[in-house]
Amino acid sequence: MATTAPPPERPYEETATAHAMEKAAIGRRAAELVQPGATVVLDVGTTTTAVARALVQRTDLEGVTVVTNGLTIATELEAPLARFTVMLTGGTLRRMQHSLVDPMGGLVLDRIHADLAIIGCNGIDPVAGITNVNLPEVSMEAADARLGPAPGGGHRRLQAGRHLGGADLPRRRRRPGDQRPLRARRGRRAAHRARPGAGAGRRSGPAVWSPAPHPGLNRLEDTGPVSDHPGLTAQLLHVGPHRGAHRVAARASFSVLVPLLVLWSTGHLELAIYATFGAFTSLYGRTHVRLSRARMQATLAVLLTASVTLGTLVGTSSHRSWLAVPVAALVAAAGSLLSDAQDWHPPGPLFLVFSFAACASVPATLADVPVAAAVAGASALFALGVGAAGAGWRHWRGGAAPAAGAPSRPSYDGVARRHVLRNAGGVLLAGALATSLGIGHPYWAMVSAAVPLAARDLVPQVVRGVHRVAGTLVGLGVAALLFALDPTGLVLIAVVVALQATAELLVGRNYAFALVAITPLALLMVHLAAPVPSSVLLRDRGVETVLGVGVGLVMGWLTRSPSPAGPLSGGRSAPAPGARRRRP
C-alpha cells in the first residue's frame, strides 16, 4: 500500500517560533511540578526549552539540579547558576536540534536518580513506548523514561510533544505502563493521535497513539494543570506556596504609598483612585523576572493609564452609566486579546476593566480628564521605577540576569476568539443587567463577571467565582469596621498600604483570602473619589458581586470547548475531525 512520504524534520530555530503561547503555557504548568532541591531531567526540544524558561522565572526555586541533553536548555539555565546545578549528558552533537545523543550520550542518565523527567517525543504507544523519527534521540528518551526514583522516593514523568500543531501533541505518563494522552487543540483542527505525514510543522515519523482517548483529559486551550485534577472542594480550600510573595507585596505597597503621600501633601487625596490604578502596574509579571517583567509592566503602564483616561472621559457624560457598559466590553475584548498574545500575569482584562469602569462611574468634567491621566501616568511610571530598582538590587546580589527569551508571537486562533467572546460578553451582560436593575455602581458587576473568566477551564472558573463571593462577603465586614472607624489622612494611607500588601501576600495562595483585603481597599478608594453612605456601598458591592459572578460563570459554561473533557464532564471525548483509529 503506497503512502505519502513524510515531510522533512524542521530545525530547532524554525520550530521555536511556532505556537509560542501554547509552549509557554505548558512550560509554566510543568515548572509548577518542580520543588526546591529536586533533580529534573529535561529532554531536548522547543517545548522543554519553554519549561526551562519557566523554571528560571520560579524565583523561589533553590538547589534544583537539571540534567539535559539540550544545549539550548543549558544556555537558558546558565545565568541563574547560583540557584541551579546544570548537568549536560555529554555525547555526540546533533546539529538539527542542538542535542547530545549516543554514542556516549546516555552514560550520565544511567547513573542518576531523578524526581521528574520531562520528555519530548513524536509519539507514545501503550506497548512500544516512546517513538521518534530520529533513532539516537529515541535512545536518549528511552534512557530518560527508565530513570528510577532514589531508594524510598517517588518519581514522576511528564511526556510532552516535541512540536505543537498537527499531530505532535503533549502527553503525560501517570505511571509506568499507563501512558494516556494529554490532548492539545488549536481550535478544532488538531488530531488526537499521530499518523505518518499528518500535520504541518511536525517531526514526521511512525508515531502511534492509544486507540481511544481517555475520558478525563484536559485540553491545552484550557491550560489546566499538568497533574491530575484535585476535587472541587480541595481546590476551594487549597492554599498555595509562598513563592516570594513578599517581594511582590513590597513592590506593590511601596508603589501605592509614595503617590498617595504626594497627593496627601498637596491636599488632593480625592485623586487617590487614579493613582491607585496607575500603581496596579506593579502587580503584573510576578512570575516573570527582570527584562521580561519590565516589558510586561511597561505595556500595562500605558494601558492602565489609557483605561483611566478613557473612563474619566466617559464620566463627563450625563449618560455615563449606560455608555460605560459597551465601552467596558470593548476594553475587555482588547485586554483579552493582548493578554493571550503577550502572556500576561495575572491573565485577562480584569484590571483594565476595573480601572476604566470605576473611573467612568465618577462624575467628571473635561478639565478632570488630563488631571486623571497625569496622576495615573505618573503613578504607573513610579511603579515601573520601583520594579526596575528591585531588579537592579537582585542583580547586584545574585549576578547576571537570566535570559528573558523572545517575546511570544500573537496567535489569534479559535481559543483566543473564545476568550474574547466570553470576556466581552460577560462584561456586557453583567453591566447591562446591573444598570437596568438600577443598582448603584454597576461596574462592580462587570468586574466580578471578568473574575472567573480569567481562568480558562470550567472548574477553575467555579473556584474563582466561589472565592470571589466568599471573600467579598467577609471583606464587607472588614470594610464596615473601617468605615465605622473613619480613618483619614496619614492613617487612611497606612490602612490602604497595609491592605494592598496583604492582598498581594495572599492572592497567589488563596484568592478568597486576598478578597478579604481587596474588598475594603476598593471600597475606600471609591468612597474617597465619590463619597456616598457606607451602607449603600456595602449593599451594592455585595449584590453586584453575586450578580457578576453568576453572569461570568454562565458565560464560561456557554463558551466552553465544543468537546469538553475535564473533571466536570466525565464523558468520553469524541475524536477530532479527521483522526483515524489504529487498526487492532
Image (tube, helix red, strand yellow):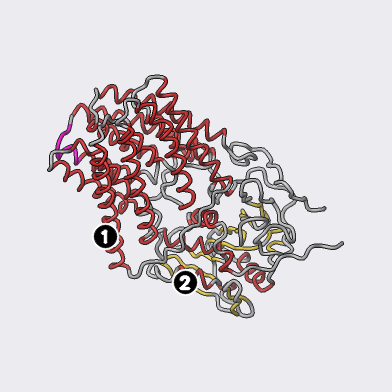
Q: Is residue 164 left or right of residue 547?
A: right
Residue at image location 35% in from the left, 40% down from the top: 514
| Magenta span includes 492 | yes
Q: Is residue 171 above or below residue 436?
A: below
Residue type at numbered disc 2: Thr
Q: Is residue 381 above or below residue 489?
A: below
**Outermost residue to the front:** 366
Residue 328 location, x and y as percent? 41, 35
Q: Nearer the viewer, residue 393 or 475?
A: 393
Q: Is residue 247 left or right of residue 130?
A: left
Residue 225 location, x and y as percent? 53, 48
**Badge 2 element:** helix
Residue 116 location, x and y as percent? 54, 61
Residue type at numbered disc 1: Ala
Q: Is residue 528 above or below residue 578?
A: above
Residue 261 location, x and y as percent? 16, 45
Where on the picture, by quarter, is residue 329? top left
Q: Is residue 148 left or right of residue 470?
A: right
Circle number at residue 75:
2
Q: Is residue 199 left or right of residue 417?
A: right
Mark sitting earlier along the chain (2/1): 2
Highlighted range, magenta: 487-494
**Badge 1 element:** helix
| Magenta span includes 496 | no
Residue at image location 38% in from the left, 57% down from the top: 295
Q: Nearer the viewer, residue 548 or 362?
A: 362
Circle number at residue 389:
1
Q: Nearer the viewer, mark 2 or mark 1?
A: 1
